[in-house]
Amino acid sequence: YYQLLKAQRDNLDFLMPQFYNGITRPVIDGFANAGTGSVSTASVYTDLANDLFDFEPEKVVFGFCISDCSASNSNANAAQAVTVLQELKSYNNNEFQCNGGAFFWVAANDPDGSWATAVSAETSTGCESEQPSLQPSSQPSKSSAPSTQYRPSSSPSESAMPSLRPSLNPSKKPSADPSWSPSTSPTSPPPTSSPTTPFPTRSPTPAPTRSPSPYLWYPDWTGANEGCINDGQEPAYMVNNPSYLSEDLETCCSNHYNWMYYTCLGETAGGGIGMYYPDWTTNTGCLNDGMEPQYMTDNPTTFMHDTLASCCSSNFIWMYDDCMLNSGGGGVVTTTAPGIGNYYPDWVTRDTCVNDGNEPDYMSTNPEVWMHVTLESCCSRNYLWDYDNCIGGGGGGGVATTVVPPSAGLYYPDWENTDICLNDGNEPAYMSSNPTAWMLETLFACCEKYYSWKQDACMGGDGASATGQWFVDWNSCELLESHCVESFIWRSYVLTLILF
């Protein structure tokens, strides 16, 4: 499980490990020690922050139990929890000073909020400081972030991109000499004979563009937490991990405030009028009255739809027809069935793919999932385990046609029976439905790919011609001729050497 999480760490915002009822006892042993617990809390926390995550303690949320864990001596009152968090911050020369904070089990056991208030006060400090530690950490950071010290390189860089910040030491003279003779023509093209736009824009921009800044944008989590800023005051952990920084406001808002994107931009979405949104207050369908909640306006790509059909399909697929009839801005609702004539899985009646136009509503209203242009595609998607019968029994009337499968005449490895390559058309369905992955045009190619250790036997195994030579059958070795015996004697000899 640990390795699965580590492999997906770039997709994880945070983890909430429970440091109670398990192998650690931070309240009794302290953060850095073991004793009552079989291992120290620090060792587990360090593995999560620096190995499972890439030196990102801010993604590890420390879990406490406040009253339900007395059987394992894991309860932590507010003062004890604050002590543990202070030890966490100071551990290894403040390595985890900026961390993911804490959570507790369970809210019902803190009715007046006194535990949460005390611990929240402790978790709210630590990430805002950019003061260096008094001593260097015991191990260097893995971060690939550039150094924050401005030191000129020994030679000019070859990058064509301008630097994000002005140089601290400007050159005393221009970098290039002037040309010796004037150019023969203007450097810019001649003026056009007419304006580039036939008429002025309809209205001026609502506000001037933002002034350029030498600093990158970062999420303002420790400030107002209403968006991204670029004042050059980002915390050190962000400087050391450039994934937090963005070159423009739009990217920063999209990465860190996507649920309130337009608020982060400092704009009003203004795109909701006339667009459809799910009306979850009545739960009967979609509306386009411009009264959608602010969180939908701030995240229109998730909640807002250009068409009623798209809104109903995305949010009310189980009652699609009712949604279409109950929703919108009036008028007659008409629906089309894009699946008519295409194949669908008939699980109720014939248990195969058919194209009789009687597919259920949920299939016809979501054809990209359920409907297929060809019988082969439908059988491969829905009846792979019974592909041959599906192909033979599918259809819905009309003129029957014989379809030559793409696997016809190709060789496949017959692992279940003869254990050689065959082209008798009896390959398993998963091979015939994906012949490019499993099947080959020639016997030689098939034997070379799947039976390279016994290619001669494979080549003679199609019934056309046998070599007449004895070979070692490592599975049973029933043909005890001299070569077979010698092979097994050799294996026994090697095994004897290993044992002694």
Image: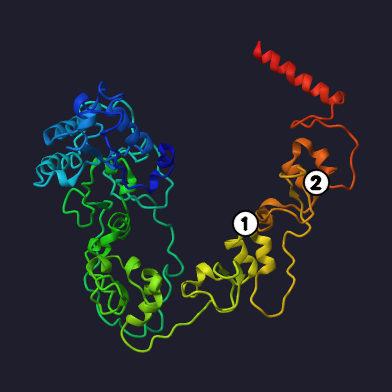
Residue 430 vertical placement versus 289 (above, below): above
Side of 331 relative to 414 (left or right): left
Pair 2/1: label in front? 1
At a point 36% along the width and 39% down the height, the residue shown is 53
**SS type, badge 2:** helix
Q: Quadrant of the N terminus?
A: top left
Residue 233 vertical placement versus 84 (above, below): below
Q: Residue furthest top?
A: 500
Residue 139: x %, y % from top left: 33, 27
Q: Mark 2 is on which residue type? A: Phe
Pointer 1 residue: 385
Tell me, for residue 444, which label it has, or none: 2
**SS type, badge 1:** helix
Side of 266 relative to 413 (left or right): left
Residue 210: x %, y % from top left: 24, 63
Side of 436 relative to 51 (left or right): right
Q: Mark 1 is on which residue type? A: Trp
Side of 163 relative to 109 (left or right): right
Residue 90: x %, y % from top left: 20, 29
Q: How is the image coloured?
A: rainbow
At a point 42% along the width and 85% down the height, the residue shown is 334
Residue 455: x %, y % from top left: 79, 39
